[in-house]
Image: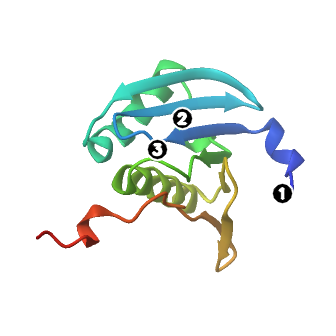
Amino acid sequence: MVIDYWLLYLMKLYINTSDRESIKIGLLSGEKFLIEKVYEAKFRQAEKLLTGIEKMLATVKVKLSEIEAIEVENRGGGFTSLRIGVITANALGFALGIPVRSVAGGDAEADGFSIVEAQYSQEPTITISKK
């Protein structure tokens, strides 16, 4: 694994939706958390993630435009909950023009923009036939 040492000094948003029951988000300065929040979000990650990020940033008086990188958990958990975090991180990174990196590895490039690919631990239940 290649370490991007310049990422160690940036203001980073951390997103973890790998748990089906909750969302964990944080704001790091370098490798130190300035703030961490955990929200109960069973089957509600999509509804709670962006509002949670907005509230967290307001608490520490940091604007979204001040975020310089995003780190996201991209392994484990439920198919849908994990996908919501990865997609949100990639979309925010693209919109802000900042790098997105996975905590566990698995980064890719798409048209010069770094993206994170979700690595699912199981097949989504929507593809399993019901008998």
Q: Quadrant of residue 50?
A: top left
Q: Is residue 116 above or below residue 68?
A: below
Please state which amino acid type lies under the numbered disc 2.
Answer: Lys
Mark 1 neighbour density, 10 Å: few (under 14) some (14–19) many (20 or more): few
Q: Quadrant of the C terminus?
A: bottom left
- Residue that label 2 marks: 63
Q: Residue furthest bottom?
A: 111
Position in image of residue 67 (x %, y %): 62, 41
Q: Is residue 102 above or below residue 27?
A: below
Report the Cα–Cα distance between label 1 and label 3: 21 Å
- Residue that label 3 marks: 18
Position in image of residue 109 (x %, y %): 68, 73
Q: Nearer the viewer, mark 2 or mark 3?
A: 3
Give the mark nearer the N terminus: 2 vs 1: 1
Label 3: state its secondary structure.
Answer: loop
- Residue that label 1 marks: 1
Give the mark nearer the N terminus: 1 vs 3: 1
Which residue sits at x=67%, y=62%?
A: 106
Report the Cα–Cα distance between label 2 and label 3: 25 Å
Question: How does the figure colour the protein chain or chains?
Answer: rainbow
Q: In the visual, does 101 lie left or right of 92?
A: right
Mark 3 neighbour density, 10 Å: few (under 14) some (14–19) many (20 or more): many
